[in-house]
Image: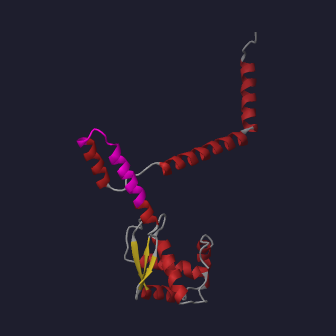
Amino acid sequence: MEEYTPESQEAKSEQLKRWFQDNLRIIISVALVIVIAGGIYSYSKRTDSPIVADQSQVTDIEATEEGQADETPAIEKAVAENKEAKQEVSSAAVSKETEGSFIETAGRNDSITILARRATANYLEKNQDSALTKEHKIYIEDYLRKNVSQKGGAKIGTSVEFSKDLIQKAIEKSKTLNENQLKNLQKYSARVSSLT
């Protein structure tokens, strides 16, 4: 039988400490893999769950629950309507040109900046300007974002109107940027692969 003395406990403590230090990288790597795998699993489960589209559908379900013993048809109806609404909205991310503006409708994950980028690209497709660099375009979309009447961000299906005059004004202002300002915008333009 092994005797426990303060020296033997201290030696075991030192061995455990040394083992932990020697294997710290492996322990951290395993922990990171577990956290990432858990995040991926959580995200995949979140996107699979049905979401009720609006409050009126919740009210319909509650009324059905009170009035009928079997609520399953109401829930199935709400889920089906939600899927139809998602399909309609996801295809609603469109651009429309009027005589004096471009109207951009937000799709999934679109922001006012992305809508401004789309409006700028549509404008420049019809009014090409070879003097504009990626940095100029970053300035233009930011200028549009700050000067558009839409407040509070863009939700799926939100339409934002960018006047052609405002786009032209943003282009003219971008051409007044000095070299330092353009250089500063390079860190932002490097993040956007869709700019040409």
Q: In the image, what residue occupies the spot 35% across and 51% down? A: 77
Q: Quadrant of residue 103?
A: bottom left
x 47%, y 64%: residue: 108
For residue 25, which quarter of the picture?
Answer: top right
Question: Residue 32 at x, y = what percent?
Answer: 64, 45
Q: Quick one: quadrant of the C terminus?
A: bottom right
Asked if residue 59 is positioned above or below residue 153 in the image, the reply reads above
Main SS of residues in magenta: helix
| Residue drawn at the location 46% of the way across and 70% of the way down | 93
**Among the 4 quarters of the image, the one containing residue 80:** bottom left
Query: How many numbered tags mark residues here?
Result: 0
Per the image, is 79 magenta? yes
Magenta-span inclusion, residue 58: no
The residue lying at 38 percent from left, 48 percent from top is 76
Q: Which residues are magenta?
A: 66-84
Quarter of the image where the N terminus is located = top right
Question: What x and y, as percent, mark residue 179?
Answer: 61, 84
Q: Nearer the viewer, residue 137 or 63?
A: 63
In front of the other: 145 or 85: 85
Residue 131 vs residue 92, the one in the foreground = 92
Relative horizontal placement of residue 177, taking residue 12 as reference (left or right): left
Q: Is residue 63 left or right of residue 81?
A: left
Position of 55 with respect to 174 (left or right) is: left
Residue 139's x, y, as percent? Answer: 53, 79
Q: How is the image coloured?
A: secondary structure
Decide which of 120, 145 is in the foreground and name it: 120
